[in-house]
Image: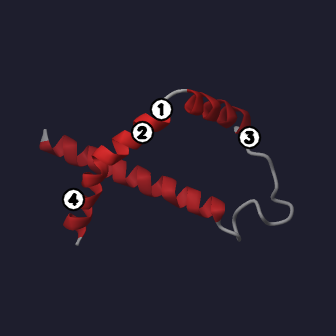
Amino acid sequence: MTSEIIAFLGFVFIATTLIAKVCERRQDVLHGPYIEGRNVPHPFRSSIDWLEQVFYSSNLRQSFARLGLQVRNVSYFASAIIC
């Protein structure tokens, strides 16, 4: 049981890191859509717009905020282990 928890937490941290790297690269001036000629529309733009509408029309935003407040101690614990 303990190994599954450790594996799940490891997966969550790796997924979070990869998502953060993708978002960071997307906002980067050298690799983002800011360079002339790279203003290509995202292939899943309509799906993303639909998901944003669903997300904002429901109460998921408040639920995720509450969940983030409850789970923030996990990141504190993880940084204490790393240090």
**Residue plotted at (33% across, 47% down):** 69
**Residue plotted at (35% across, 48% down):** 12
Label 4 sits on a secondary structure element that is helix
Q: Quadrant of residue 44?
A: top right
Q: Comparing marks 4 and 2, which lies closer to the viewer? A: 2
Q: How is the image coloured?
A: secondary structure
Label 1 crowd bin: few (<14), some (14–19), many (20+), radius 10 Å: few
**C-alpha gap between disc 2 and disc 3:** 27 Å
Mark 2 — residue? 64
Mark 1 — residue? 60
**C-alpha gap between disc 4 and disc 3:** 38 Å
Q: Comparing marks 1 and 3, which lies closer to the viewer? A: 1
Mark 4 — residue? 77
**Residue plotted at (69% across, 66% down):** 31
Q: Quadrant of the C terminus?
A: bottom left
Mark 3 — residue? 43
Horizontal and vertical percent position of residue 47: 67, 32
